């Protein structure tokens, strides 16, 4: 059905306005980072800085151990994702291929894990990690993040494996592979895109965590993640928004990139556990 | 190529050695009778991880909530069983305030996310130039870590130089700048706005996926039957979307219930407890006042509420979960 | 190459039994086809033969060795799947050589066998392509090649032609048969298509609901079906099935079909008093002439060029009840297949001739054939 020019105009108009408003805060973050201090205090606010201060990024890197925080966030995320994948690839595969009694309860487990307030679990985990001497170490965060990721990744992977016909492994087994051999040599290479998407989704989950990082790592400054570090900046730099915005920009870029690549696969992760 | 059995020169290359020693053979998981062992073996690591770091801590939490304990130490003998924490909880005005704040927040944020999420999904579902870009942009807030969203909005809501005050004064909505973070009502609004901004993309993405999975033919059949745009929306779009919308509503709700990062870093639960949800209260009691027993009790109650509410909602649409 | 013995295999999933006491001996070099409607258990039996499923009870012996609990890779069998199951991340060469590589066969030997098989199947110009670049027929050939290269004791084929279009299916059927003639390897072939069974098999095993209905070579199965189900399944269109009560008088036994008396060349003592199910194949009626005849009025005439299908409505007294016939629709219809017939119009009476000796007799209650 053809649209009238008026309808087209209305549609484009609505899209531009709405997208503009919704994305504006992100734009504003970039602007704030690049603005000179006095520009920030100007009324009316300037929507584009006259002299963008590109040096702010170097400044914040010098000022704050941003790279250290970044390194910690990356390490924590890689560790958490690595651990999660090692555990959930076999689990997702088992749920996909075998008629296990735990099959339907997985959905229940995922739903329950979404209901658990992190603030509840954080208390016993704090006690446990202190007992194990892991407080302040990145391992506490890695393990905690893994518990966040594993239910999602297992379900996502199960979904991906479901789309691969079982005959592939059967052919491999007839050809002489053991069942695990068939999984490793045939199913994993074929499901590589799904594995990548799941891993990236796990990375985003780990990157976004604050509660666990704050509880377990506050005492160990050298292990602070980005989220933790940036929040402390706000206490101090209550008036230097440019610096903290610049730090935020640097912290956001990795996730933005991942999001750009992941956008198509997002639905899979988000609906994890919510459909049979 | 060999044609008959007797001419096979490749005898040595075919098949694996037939006999394996007995104990090894019984471990051979490739054998049909052992295959399901493999399934359980593969599942085991994930299950163990979840038991060790979710189920066990949850149990510990429950245990702690029945003890009068400040900071929990495993190496000390267990404190005696007592329901004092729960009694204190139910008679505490702070607790009920937290419940009220949580409920308010859940209702406000969830409905707004619903409207905004569905609206943007419907908008972006149309065909127009630049549609992929619009889709990307609409869901972008999802990718921004909550902490960073808090920084952005803390600046936007700044009482002296924040854009929002400036805009509202310009539009004539208010006379003088609002101090968003020291005024109870305003603080609540600020928290809501941030949560809505972070929360609607989820509903949007789910709704969009749902919209795109509605077969074109449903609409075609309806058009042939004479239905107009509004009728098609009511009788085809909404019913087809109900399952997905239902699920995303429940998940959104649960997210608001649990959220810690946004509220804690934006307002810390204040001013005057106006943004103190159950989640914040749990954390404060545990790590602010070091009353872990009491805090665990609050946490357990929160969990119970979540479970009860989602089960209630699930009964509306049992086939989706 | 080896013989295969399936001894009293049973398969149940909890309370549901999918295979009841399957017992069969397949000779070395034989081409046996398991055929039957979907859900009859044929694929399950094949998977048990392959070791991909576990039998609840019973034994499998290949070449005299008990392989019942042996891994699929240790049975020295090769399998061809309905969906080809080619490894998408490997080239055709990689696909065909995979099994040999798993067994540690030296690379030179792998190359030799892969090249030979590829040439035999006409896919040697495709060796460096990936499966997704191939057509359906080519993929099926590669799947066959993957099986051949292993030089196994037996081939197992699970509906390999079902995903191909009709013309290609006919061509591949002939190729597989030719391959079997040449290689002479024991083959178990599963299909739901009775035409494939009839044209390719040395022996057919026809199954229904987990039980074997009959084991016979194609000719025998066509001319001497063991029961109603086999009779209606084999043949295209299947055998017409009618109901009639024989009357016995001095001239012998006779039944009334389409209102006409038709003598039954059978010992009257065997059939006296019983309601009978009769079968007559659509191909066994002609316009030319014969010992018996009936006059019918067609309801529909389909012309295929070289032959015509005539559809006639069965009179009430000649209809079998719904549960006696496996295919509910056919209980009301009688189909005749006439090659090179002239102009025939529906609603115009037609006289059809046939030989009563061609009539098959069955017991309507059990479905079994009465000789």
Image (cartoon, coloured by chain):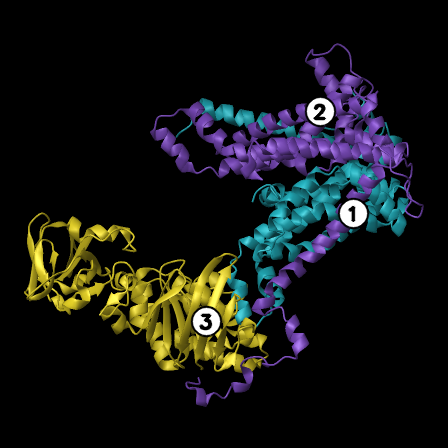
Chain colours: A cyan, B purple, C yellow
Residue at numbered disc 1: B56
Q: In the figure, is residue C337 to the left or right of C192?
A: left
Q: Nearer the viewer, mark 3 or mark 1?
A: 3
Residue B193, percent from left and from top: 70, 25
Q: C358 left or right of B224?
A: left
Q: Residues within 10 Å of mark 3 (few under 14, many from 20)?
A: some
Cα distance in 3D space between marks 2 and 3: 65 Å
Task: Residue A213: tell me if it is visible.
Answer: no
The chain ID associated with circle 1 is B
Secondary structure state at the residue bearing disc 3: strand
- The front one of A59 and B186 is B186
List x then y, in percent, for residue A23.
65, 31
Give left or right: position of C275 versus A8.
left
Q: Quadrant of the N terminus of chain C?
A: bottom left
Q: Is there CB contact under 8 Å for labels 3 and 1?
A: no
Q: Nearer the viewer, mark 2 or mark 3?
A: 3
Q: Position of residue A276 (x, y in %)?
A: 56, 45
Q: Which residue is mark 3?
A: C8
Q: Horizontal and vertical percent for residue B195?
A: 70, 29
The residue under the point 67% across, 24% down is B107
Q: Mark 2 sits on what residue?
A: B103
> Which one is in front, B300 or B143?
B300
Q: Which chain letter matches label 3?
A: C
């Amino acid at each position: 059905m053809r649209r009238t020019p008026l309808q087209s105009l209305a549609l484009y108009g609505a899209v531009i306005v709405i997208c503009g408003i919704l994305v504006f805060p992100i734009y504003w973050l970039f602007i704030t980072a690049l603005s000179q201090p006095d520009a920030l205090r100007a009324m009316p606010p300037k929507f584009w800085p006259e002299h963008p201060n590109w040096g702010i990024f170097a400044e914040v890197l010098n000022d704050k151990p941003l790279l250290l925080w970044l390194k910690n966030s990356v390490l924590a995320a890689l560790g958490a994702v690595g651990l999660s994948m090692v555990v959930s690839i076999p689990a997702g595969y088992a749920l996909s291929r075998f008629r296990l009694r735990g099959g339907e309860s997985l959905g229940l487990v995922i739903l329950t894990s979404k209901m658990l307030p992190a603030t509840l679990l954080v208390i016993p985990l704090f006690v446990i990690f202190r007992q194990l001497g892991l407080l302040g170490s990145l391992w506490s965060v890695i393990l905690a993040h893994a518990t966040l990721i594993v239910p999602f990744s297992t379900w996502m992977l199960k979904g991906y494996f479901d789309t691969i016909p079982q005959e592939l492994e059967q052919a491999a087994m007839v050809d002489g592979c053991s069942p695990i051999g068939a999984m490793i040599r045939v199913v994993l290479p074929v499901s590589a895109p799904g594995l990548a998407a799941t891993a990236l989704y796990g990375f985003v989950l780990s990157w976004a965590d604050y509660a666990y990082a704050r509880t377990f790592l506050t005492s160990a400054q050298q292990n602070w993640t980005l989220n933790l570090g940036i929040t402390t900046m706000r206490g101090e730099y209550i008036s230097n928004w440019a610096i903290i915005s610049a730090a935020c920009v640097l912290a956001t870029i990795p996730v933005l990139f991942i999001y750009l690549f992941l956008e198509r696969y997002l639905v899979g992760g988000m609906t994890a556990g919510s459909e049979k | 190529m060999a044609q008959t059995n007797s001419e096979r020169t490749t005898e040595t290359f075919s098949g694996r050695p037939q006999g394996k020693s007995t104990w090894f053979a019984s471990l051979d998981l490739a054998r049909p009778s052992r295959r399901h062992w493999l399934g359980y073996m593969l599942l085991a690591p994930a299950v163990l991880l979840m038991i060790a770091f979710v189920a066990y801590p949850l149990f510990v939490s429950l245990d702690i909530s029945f003890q009068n304990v400040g900071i929990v130490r495993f190496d000390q003998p267990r404190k005696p069983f007592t329901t004092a924490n729960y009694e204190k909880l139910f008679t505490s005005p702070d607790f009920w305030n937290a419940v009220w704040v949580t409920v308010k927040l859940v209702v406000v944020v969830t409905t707004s996310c619903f409207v905004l999420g569905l609206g943007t999904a419907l908008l972006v579902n149309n065909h127009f130039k630049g549609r992929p870009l619009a889709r990307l942009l609409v869901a972008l807030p999802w990718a921004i870590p909550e902490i960073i969203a808090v920084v952005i909005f803390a600046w936007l809501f700044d009482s002296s130089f924040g854009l929002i005050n400036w805009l509202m004064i310009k539009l004539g909505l208010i006379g003088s700048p609002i101090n968003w973070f020291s005024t109870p009502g305003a603080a609540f609004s600020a928290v809501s706005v941030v949560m809505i901004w972070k929360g609607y993309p989820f509903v949007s993405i789910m709704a969009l996926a749902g919209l795109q999975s509605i077969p074109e033919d449903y609409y075609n059949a309806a058009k042939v039957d004479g239905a107009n745009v509004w009728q098609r929306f009511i009788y085809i779009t909404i019913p087809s979307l109900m399952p997905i919308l239902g699920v995303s509503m429940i998940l959104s709700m649960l997210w608001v219930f649990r959220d810690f990062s946004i509220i804690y870093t934006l307002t810390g639960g204040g001013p005057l407890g106006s943004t103190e949800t159950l989640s914040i209260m749990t954390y404060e009691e545990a790590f602010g006042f070091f009353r872990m027993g009491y805090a665990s009790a609050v946490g357990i109650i929160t969990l119970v509420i979540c479970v009860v509410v989602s089960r209630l909602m699930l009964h509306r649409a049992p086939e989706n979960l | 190459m080896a013989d295969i013995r399936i001894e009293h295999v049973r398969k149940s999933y909890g309370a549901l039994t999918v295979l009841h006491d399957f017992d069969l001996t397949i000779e070395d070099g034989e081409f046996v086809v398991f055929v039957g409607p979907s859900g009859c258990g044929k694929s399950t039996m094949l998977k048990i033969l392959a070791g991909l499923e576990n039998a609840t009870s019973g034994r499998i012996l290949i070449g005299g060795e008990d392989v019942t609990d042996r891994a699929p890779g240790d049975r020295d069998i090769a399998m061809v799947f309905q969906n080809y199951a080619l490894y998408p991340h490997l080239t055709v060469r990689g696909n065909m050589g995979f099994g040999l590589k798993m067994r540690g066969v030296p690379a030179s030997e792998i190359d030799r066998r892969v090249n030979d098989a590829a040439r035999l199947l006409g896919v040697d110009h495709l060796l460096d392509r990936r499966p997704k670049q191939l057509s359906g027929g080519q993929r099926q050939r590669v799947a066959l090649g993957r099986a051949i290269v292993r030089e196994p004791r037996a081939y197992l084929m699970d509906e390999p032609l079902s995903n191909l279009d009709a013309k290609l299916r006919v061509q591949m059927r002939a190729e597989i048969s030719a391959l079997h003639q040449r290689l002479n390897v024991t083959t178990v072939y599963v299909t739901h298509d009775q035409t494939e069974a009839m044209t390719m098999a040395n022996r057919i095993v026809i199954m229904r609901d987990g039980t074997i209905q009959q084991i016979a070579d194609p000719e025998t199965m066509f001319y001497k079906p063991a029961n109603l189900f086999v009779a209606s399944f084999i043949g295209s269109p299947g055998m017409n099935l009618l109901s009639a009560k024989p009357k016995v008088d001095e001239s012998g036994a006779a039944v009334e079909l389409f209102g006409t008396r038709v003598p039954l060349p059978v010992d009257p003592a065997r059939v006296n008093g019983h309601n009978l199910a009769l079968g007559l194949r659509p191909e066994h009626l002609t316009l030319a002439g014969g010992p018996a005849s009936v006059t019918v009025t067609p309801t529909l005439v389909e012309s295929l060029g070289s032959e015509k299908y005539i559809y006639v409505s069965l009179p009430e007294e000649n209809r079998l009840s719904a549960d006696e016939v496996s295919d509910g629709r056919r209980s009301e219809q009688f189909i005749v297949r006439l090659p090179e017939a002239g102009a025939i119009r529906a609603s115009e009476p037609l006289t059809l001739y046939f030989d009563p000796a061609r009539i098959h007799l069955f017991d309507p209650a059990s479905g079994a054939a009465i000789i």
